[in-house]
């Protein structure tokens, strides 16, 4: 039967439409890229992506991303570089690629005999896509200043007195004893790539814990006192919290609120001393603690026994462009030349200053974690350990990226 010619206008790529409309990631689609039949179509895709296929520097960077992807896959996803990796070998054709267009054409070729090659090419493109998002995150250029501005808000309230560590204001009674205070250094590049590969969002802007702060307190009650201090001293602004990122697997707040009201009444009736009130509050916190994080835990890679109070806040970063100050000094020198001005000094003075960014202001997320001494000990033991957490992330990313290839080869993990 002859097919009506008009039907070619109504052929839908339902998989990619699903990515657009159903909240799925392209990494989870049946085929990572749509049909690319020739070099022109590959170049068209790259242009749509925002890359210039005719620019030699851009092409060189893209090929560098390709090479990095090969190394990354071998190091973290294959047996040759990782104990938990897949016992697979990349097809030799991959190593013979000299132009990214060849990779696109390989990823969209048809026929069962070339299906394995096709899926390997898609694996590499998925990792390249993620690396591009890491490299093109504009905010990373300001990271040292971002880190300084966020950490300084907390450091000014951390002090030692008689070998004890405190959160508070030195010389005042308003303080919370701490076991430890930690700041998280910047994630390694590979760690960021793995984290993005297992996240549905898969863009660098969606990483909320590149800057992290952890308080370890003596007691569960002190974890609440830390939160109270952060709010009252406007170190953290509750209005800038990202609600979906808040986690509490330490204390049932609703239950504790009821007990707290009763304890307040008892303290008034019996004129309780501050010491006895604190002891009573700690008992109530212990009684209201969660037996297991269970469904309260938003992160599938964390153990169900992971005990923590944590939230993601945003801080308004004020970045002063250091180039502007240097440029103003150059302009001053050019202006002071007076009649002895040169062509260069005239050009400097004629430049449009409005095109140079002065102060750049933007919100940046950071994560705060608060845990008591007992909870921290449990978190760092056994399956709740950070190493197990990282391993779980890595295996999850591997399964996600390789899923179509695993199904083709009937490999189960």
Image (cartoon, helix red, strand yellow):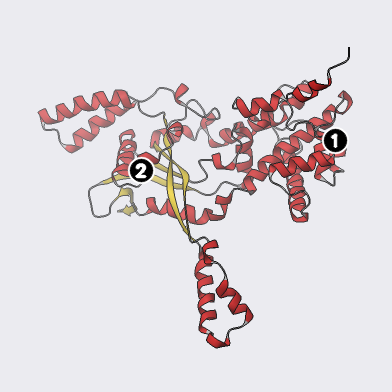
Relative depth, front residue between 291 and 260: 260
| SS label for mark 1 | loop
Mark 2 Cα shell of 10 Å, populated few (<14), some (14-19), many (≥20): some
Q: Residue furthest top?
A: 1
Relative depth, front residue between 189 and 19: 19
Mark 1 vs 2: CB contact within 8 A: no
Residue 89 coordinates in the image, percent (x, y):
82, 34
User: Is residue 243 shown above or below 135?
Assistant: above
Q: Mark 2 points at which residue?
A: 237
Residue 113 coordinates in the image, percent (x, y):
89, 25
Q: Mark 1 points at which residue?
A: 91
Q: Is residue 401 left or right of residue 299?
A: right
Residue at coordinates 69% horizontally, 40% vertically from top-left? 129
Mark 1 Cα shell of 10 Å, populated few (<14), some (14-19), many (≥20): few
Residue at coordinates 50% horizontally, 62% vertically from top-left? 321
User: Is residue 72 shown above or below 341?
Assistant: above
Relative depth, front residue between 374 and 157: 157
The disc, 1 or 2, on the residue closer to the chain's N-terminal end is 1
Can residue 37 be seen at all in this image of the molecule? yes
Q: Is residue 247 left or right of residue 49?
A: left
Relative depth, front residue between 318 and 11: 11
Q: Is residue 237 left or right of residue 319?
A: left
């Amino acid at each position: 039967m002859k097919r009506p010619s008009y039907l070619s206008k109504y052929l839908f790529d339902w998989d990619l439409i699903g990515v657009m409309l159903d909240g799925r990631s392209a990494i989870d689609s049946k085929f990572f890229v749509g049909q690319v039949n020739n070099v022109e179509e590959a170049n068209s895709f790259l242009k749509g992506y925002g890359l210039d296929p005719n620019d030699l520097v851009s092409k060189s960077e893209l090929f560098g991303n390709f090479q990095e992807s090969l190394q990354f896959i071998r190091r973290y996803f294959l047996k040759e570089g990782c104990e938990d990796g897949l016992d697979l070998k990349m097809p030799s054709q991959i190593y013979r690629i000299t132009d990214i267009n060849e990779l696109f054409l390989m990823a969209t070729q048809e026929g069962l005999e070339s299906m394995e090659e096709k899926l390997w090419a898609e694996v590499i493109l998925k990792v390249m896509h993620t690396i591009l998002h890491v490299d093109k995150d504009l905010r990373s250029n300001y990271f040292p200043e971002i880190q300084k501005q966020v950490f300084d808000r907390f450091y000014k309230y951390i002090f030692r007195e008689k070998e004890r560590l405190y959160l508070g204001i030195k010389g005042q009674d308003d303080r919370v004893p701490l076991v430890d205070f930690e700041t998280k250094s910047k994630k390694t590049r590979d760690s960021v790539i793995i984290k993005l590969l297992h996240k549905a969002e898969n863009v660098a802007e969606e990483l909320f814990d590149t800057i992290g702060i952890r308080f370890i307190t003596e007691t569960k009650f002190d974890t609440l006192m830390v939160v109270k201090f952060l709010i009252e001293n406007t170190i953290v602004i509750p209005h800038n919290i990202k609600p979906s990122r808040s986690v509490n697997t330490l204390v049932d707040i609703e239950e504790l609120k009821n007990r707290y009201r009763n304890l307040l009444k008892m303290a008034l009736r019996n004129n309780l001393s501050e010491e006895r009130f604190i002891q009573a509050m700690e008992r109530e916190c212990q009684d209201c603690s969660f037996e297991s994080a269970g469904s309260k835990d938003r992160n599938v890679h964390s153990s169900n026994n992971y005990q923590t109070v944590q939230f993601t806040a945003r801080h308004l970063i004020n970045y002063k462009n250091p180039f502007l100050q240097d440029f103003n000094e150059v302009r001053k020198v050019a202006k002071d030349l007076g009649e002895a001005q040169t062509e260069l000094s005239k050009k400097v003075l004629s430049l449009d200053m409005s095109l140079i960014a002065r102060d750049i202001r933007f919100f940046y997320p950071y994560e705060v974690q608060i845990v008591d001494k007992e909870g921290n000990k449990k978190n760092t033991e056994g399956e709740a350990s950070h190493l197990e957490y990282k391993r779980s992330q890595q295996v999850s990313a591997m399964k996600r990226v390789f899923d179509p290839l695993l199904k083709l080869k009937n490999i189960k993990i």
